[in-house]
Amino acid sequence: MRDIVWTIILIWVVWKIYGAFKSVSTKKTTSSTQQYSKQNKEGEVKIEHNAQQKSHFNPNDADYVDYEEIK
């Protein structure tokens, strides 16, 4: 009997945690969709560039690798 009660409690806790994650995911998706639809008309494409973003690749750190193509 005790095992049944603990199993029911565990299932309830897992269900609550699942519901919390699902609601957060739904809110995030809904808000981003609404925000996008307010800014752009249907069929319009907008590309945003982040000018402050730095490149993680430094060309001076790379080595040239000579290769031979085999056919």
Image (spheres, rainbow, N blue to C red):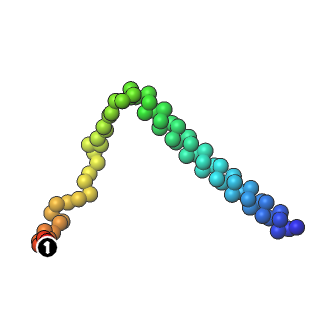
Circle count:
1
The residue identified by callout 1 is: 70
Q: What residue lies at 78% left-to-right and 59% top-to-bottom?
A: 9
Examine the rendered structure and indicate whether residue 28 appears above or below residue 21: above
Q: Position of 27 compared to 1: left or right?
A: left
Judged left or right of residue 15, residue 44 is left
Which residue sits at x=73%, y=59%? 11
Between 37 and 56, the one lying in front of the other is: 37
User: In terms of depth relative to the viewer, which is nearer, 36 or 42?
Assistant: 42
**How busy is the neighbourhood of tag 1: few (under 14 within 10 Å), some, or many (20 plus)?**
few
Q: Is residue 32 above or below residue 4?
A: above
| Screen quadrant of the N terminus | bottom right
Residue at 38% across, 26% down: 41
Q: Look at the image and tell me in which quarter the C terminus lies.
A: bottom left
Q: Amino acid at mark 1?
A: Ile
Q: Quadrant of residue 62?
A: bottom left
Residue shown at 60% from the left, 48% from the top = 22
Helix, strand or loop under label 1:
loop
Residue 22 appears in the rendering = yes
